[in-house]
């Protein structure tokens, strides 16, 4: 079987299952099972699939994923994230597009503190969307900033996706986490500039409304209580990696410990909150690990059946023809 036929036979079912609504992890699993049986020698191929799957999820570098999930779940379930949103609300005042800007600001802070885009979407959507609809915000200026800023969780450390990509691509996790800081903050700045310009040119997209004036003393007090302590969490993850004091796995552990400690110091780390945090983070982590194992095994299936080699040969031949024609 030609390599391009194999590539089509493998990719079409994978994309078809995803389009049908099957979770990504199970789509990879189904294609890997059938592909291993048909293309890798029957049950011996499935046995190799199992060995590859076990090897892909027993990597020590995957530990930060579960710990980052614990950070995010503890932040949201203990109410620390809600306090953060209340503090941002006090600072934005009567600024045009303030709710959209709050979505971006909250998304950046949640991304820096938790790396959990799903929790960020849930909190920002439940707290800001009703207010945006009530104030007459257009969909593009309500849902757009929430989804866009929540997506920054994959661009600003701690980022679980960065760990996944590092494991799959065999790249230094620490370098990825440090390298995505500037692009993530740049994207956030571009979001803010876009909202300000768009609201200036089309004021009807984000109507202004009266908000109670908050004294500066109240703002500073809320900042000191709800934002400044969070800098300890940021340093415990990003700072220790940047200074070379800890590996990414160790930094994830210190970040999770700092988050739980902050919740405990505020008297919010009850048995129920702790239990819900652990079980919820475990469920999300398992799904992520299934996706990682499926992606790694799928790449090995492609490598065994030849499409990467065929594509590389085709690209090399095309490059050679282009050079000859230019010369």
Image: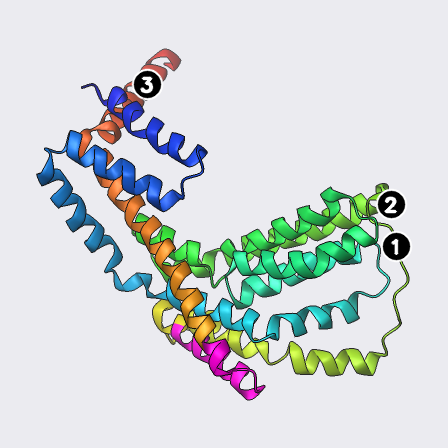
Identify whether 70 is placed above or below 117: below
Residue at far top of view = 325
Q: Quadrant of residue 54?
A: bottom left
Percent coordinates x, y for residue 46 in the rendering: 15, 41
Question: Which of pointers 2 and 3 indicates the residue nearer the eye?
Answer: 2
Q: Which residue is mark 3?
A: 318
Q: Which residue is mark 2?
A: 203
Percent coordinates x, y for residue 174 in the rendering: 38, 62
Q: Which secondary structure, mark 2?
A: helix
Q: Which residue is mark 1?
A: 208
| Principal secondary structure, stretch drawn in magenta | helix
The residue carrying pointer 3 sits among few (fewer than 14), some (14 to 19) or many (20 or more) residues within 10 Å by Cα, namely few
Residue 266 highlighted magenta (yes or no): yes
Which image quarter is the N terminus in?
top left
Question: Mark number for residue 168?
Answer: none
Q: Which residues are magenta?
A: 253-274
Identify whether 264 is placed above or below 186: below
Q: Is residue 171 visible?
A: no
Percent coordinates x, y for residue 296 in the rendering: 27, 46
Looking at the image, tell me whether mark 2 or mark 3 is earlier in sequence order: 2
Q: Which secondary structure, mark 1?
A: loop
Q: Residue at 78% across / 71% down in the picture?
A: 90
Residue at far right of view = 210
From mark 2 to mark 3, how far is it between C-alphas?
Answer: 52 Å
């Amino acid at each position: 079987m030609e390599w391009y036929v194999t590539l089509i036979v493998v990719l079409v079912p994978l994309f078809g299952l995803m389009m049908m609504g099957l979770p990504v992890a199970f789509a990879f699993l189904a294609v890997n099972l059938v592909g291993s049986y048909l293309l890798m020698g029957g049950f011996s191929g499935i046995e190799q699939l199992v060995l590859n799957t076990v090897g892909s999820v027993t990597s020590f570098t995957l530990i930060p994923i579960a710990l980052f999930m614990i950070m995010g779940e503890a932040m949201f379930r203990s109410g620390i994230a809600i306090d953060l949103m209340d503090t941002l609300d006090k600072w934005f005042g009567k600024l045009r597009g303030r709710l959209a800007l709050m979505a971006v600001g909250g998304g950046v802070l949640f991304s820096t503190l938790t790396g959990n885009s799903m929790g960020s979407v849930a909190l920002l959507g439940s707290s800001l969307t009703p207010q945006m609809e009530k104030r007459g915000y257009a969909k593009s200026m309500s849902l757009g900033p929430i989804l866009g800023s929540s997506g920054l969780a994959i661009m600003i450390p701690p980022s679980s996706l960065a760990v996944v990509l590092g494991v799959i691509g065999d790249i230094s996790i620490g370098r990825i986490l440090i390298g995505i800081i500037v692009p993530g903050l740049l994207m956030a700045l571009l979001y803010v500039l876009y909202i300000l310009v768009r609201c200036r040119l089309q004021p009807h997209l984000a109507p202004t409304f009266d908000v109670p004036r908050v004294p500066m003393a109240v703002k500073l007090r809320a900042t000191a209580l709800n934002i400044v302590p969070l800098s300890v969490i940021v340093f415990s993850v990003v700072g220790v990696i940047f200074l070379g004091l800890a590996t990414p796995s160790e930094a994830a552990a210190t970040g999770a410990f700092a988050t739980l400690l902050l919740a405990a110091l505020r008297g919010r780390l009850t048995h129920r909150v702790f239990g819900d945090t652990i079980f919820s983070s475990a469920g999300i982590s398992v799904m992520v690990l299934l996706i990682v194992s499926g992606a790694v095994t799928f790449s090995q299936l492609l490598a065994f059946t030849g499409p990467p080699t065929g594509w590389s040969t085709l690209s090399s031949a095309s490059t050679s023809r282009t050079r000859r024609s230019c010369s």
